[in-house]
Image: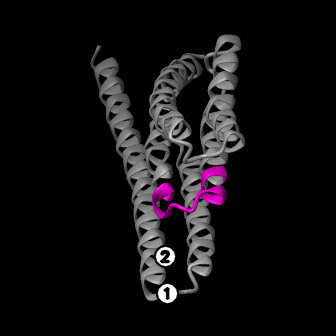
């Protein structure tokens, strides 16, 4: 029972932090896109769609947290919801650099210490980057500059995604090793008493 309480306590803290980090990202992106909307550099429909993909998951994660702060669904809403935003932006934007929006979420998912989840998010980011860069490069007629930009986008996303997953796995292993040492020390202490 104690392990379950510790797990729930850690999950609640991870969900709190994950939601805060998600909110910070969303507020910054909202300011950026509203600014673009005021300059007419994005259509009203585009702005509404982007706002819905940004704020929908925030609202849903808030509702889930209010109902059950230890819900495993919250991390999926945060990760998948933000992924839908990235997908939307990558498919409708003609800007090469929008793929970098995925990078903060690769860091956010690390707080859950869930290697499988971090691999899924990293894999989705890499796949989205490949599709996005291929579309832009094709639209640019496979010019040398477009091909170079495509290579940079794919390479940088792969590096950040893979390194994020590897760092997550390393942190998990360190935590497991530290817990094992604590348990061994506790056992030794109990045996001495």
Is 33 situated left or right of 72 in this image?
Answer: left
Which label was assigned to residue 143?
A: 1
Mark 2 lies on residue: 150
Is 60 situated left or right of 187 in this image?
Answer: right
Q: Residue at 50% across / 26% down in the picture?
A: 23
Q: Position of residue 107 (x, y in %)?
A: 43, 44
Q: Position of residue 89 (x, y in %)?
A: 61, 51
Q: Assign the N terminus to one quadrant of the image.
A: top right
Q: Foreground residue, 85 or 76?
A: 85
Callout 1: 10 Å neighbours few (<14), some, many (20+)? few
Magenta span: 88-99
Magenta region includes residue 6: no
Q: Residue at 46% across / 42% down in the picture?
A: 110
Callout 2: 10 Å neighbours few (<14), some, many (20+)? many
Give above or below for 164 relative to 74: below
Q: Foreground residue, 111 or 160?
A: 160
Q: Which image quarter: residue 100?
A: bottom left
Give above or below for 165 relative to 129: above
The overriding secondary structure of the stretch rendered in magenta is helix
Which label was assigned to residue 177?
A: none
Q: Foreground residue, 27 or 64?
A: 27
Q: Residue at 56% across / 78% down in the picture?
A: 137
Q: Position of residue 167 (x, y in %)?
A: 38, 52
Q: Residue at 49% across / 37% down in the picture?
A: 29
Magenta region includes residue 91: yes
* Precedes in sequence: disc 1 or disc 2: 1
């Amino acid at each position: 029972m104690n392990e379950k309480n510790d797990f729930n306590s850690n999950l609640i803290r991870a969900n709190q932090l994950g939601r805060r980090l998600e909110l910070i990202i969303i507020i910054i992106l909202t300011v950026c896109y509203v600014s673009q909307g005021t300059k007419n550099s994005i259509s009203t429909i585009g702005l509404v769609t982007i706002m819905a993909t940004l704020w929908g998951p925030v609202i849903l994660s808030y509702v889930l947290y209010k109902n059950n702060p230890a819900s495993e669904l919250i991390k999926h809403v945060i990760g998948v919801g933000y992924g839908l935003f990235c997908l939307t932006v990558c498919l409708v934007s003609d800007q090469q650099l929008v793929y970098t929006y995925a990078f903060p979420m690769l860091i956010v998912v690390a707080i859950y210490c869930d290697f499988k989840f971090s691999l899924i998010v990293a894999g989705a980011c890499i796949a989205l980057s490949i599709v996005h860069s291929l579309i832009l490069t094709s639209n640019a007629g496979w010019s040398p500059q477009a091909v170079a930009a495509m290579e940079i986008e794919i390479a940088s996303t792969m590096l950040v995604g893979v390194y994020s997953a590897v760092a997550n796995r390393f942190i998990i292993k360190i935590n497991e090793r530290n817990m094992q040492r604590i348990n061994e020390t506790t056992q030794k202490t109990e045996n001495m008493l």
